[in-house]
Amino acid sequence: MPDAAELLRILDEEIVSCRKCPRLVAYREQVAREKRRAYRDWIYWGKPVPGFGDPKAQLLLVGLAPGAHGSNRTGRPFTGDASGVFLYKALYDAGFANQQVALQRDDGLQLRNAYITAAARCAPPDNKPLPAELLNCRPYLERDLEILKPRAVLALGKIGWDVYLSILKHQGLITSRAAYPFAHGAEADIPAAGTRLFGVYHPSQQNTQTGKVTPAMYAKVLRRIRRFLEK
């Protein structure tokens, strides 16, 4: 029987070849052709972005979607933009990554006991996937959960939180999403799913540059997750 690493590899191949959402296909490919001036010498990824991390991870991080000139350029979650600079430093400081540098897929970055996925796998216009697009992408996150069986899920923002809870509701593991309100630092045991759900504000520039999110705020939540996983 295939192990988790092989199952994730198979899933990644399916994700990368996905063309379910015409609006997102058109946008991600247009961005890859036109590029940003600072990256004009790059060959953009321009495809759906698969998950990344430790196939034996107990912690699953659920982001929103690839950045147009970040993950859509590099092909790895939170790699090549300011959100990734903030997130990977936080993960490194908490012991979930071997380095804080995340520039491109072959930069040596490895995650330890953590795996990063997303609610949407293609870069959306204005960073806003449509409800139908999130629904199209949801089966891939369901597969991540089935393969990894994480003990802890960290939602990077409200959309990641809501999409995860919508999966649990669809599977009959919870009766209502309203019982689990999102907030930075929110935490909830979900016994039927065998997980504890944690929430943080998304590490977007809009949040980090305004002080809505600080390194100390992420460090506090990641310490709680590490303590939980060490029990």
Image (spheres, rainbow, N blue to C red):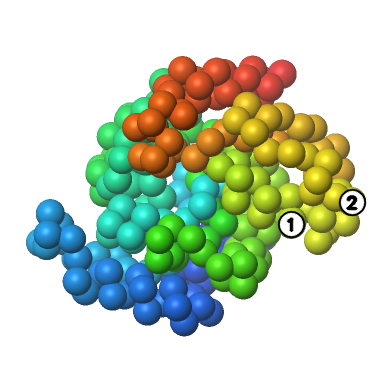
Residue identified by numbered label 2: 175
Classify residue 220 as left or right of residue 40. Answer: right
In front here: 168 or 216? 216
**Furthest-front residue in this view:** 210
SS of the residue under disc 2 = loop
Q: How many labels does the image show?
A: 2
Q: For residue 57, what is the image quadrant?
A: top right
Identify which residue is drawn at 88% across, 56% down. Answer: 172
- Residue 76: x, y in percent? 37, 53
Classify residue 11 as left or right of residue 48. Answer: right
In front here: 100 or 68? 68
Classify residue 173 as left or right of residue 215. Answer: right
- Residue 37: x, y in percent? 12, 59
SS of the residue under disc 1 = helix
- Residue 215: x, y in percent? 42, 22
Identify which residue is drawn at 78% across, 40% down. Answer: 180
**For mark 1, does the 10 Å Cα neighbourhood hold few (<14), some (14 to 19), or many (20 or more) residues?**
some
Identity of the amino acid at label 1? Ile
Identify which residue is drawn at 31% across, 40% down. Answer: 82
Q: For residue 16, what is the image quadrant?
A: bottom left
- Residue 26: x, y in percent? 37, 79
Classify residue 71 as left or right of residue 60. Answer: left
Quadrant including the C terminus: top right
Identify which residue is drawn at 56% across, 42% down. Answer: 157
Asked whether residue 4 is in view, the answer is no
The reply to whether dot 1 and dot 2 touch (C-beta < 8 Å) is no
Quadrant including the N terminus: bottom right
Identity of the amino acid at label 2? Thr
Q: Which numbered circle lies on residue 138?
A: none
Q: Which numbered circle lies on residue 167?
A: 1
Asked whether residue 36 is in view, the answer is yes
Give the Cα separation between the discs numbered 1 and 2: 11 Å
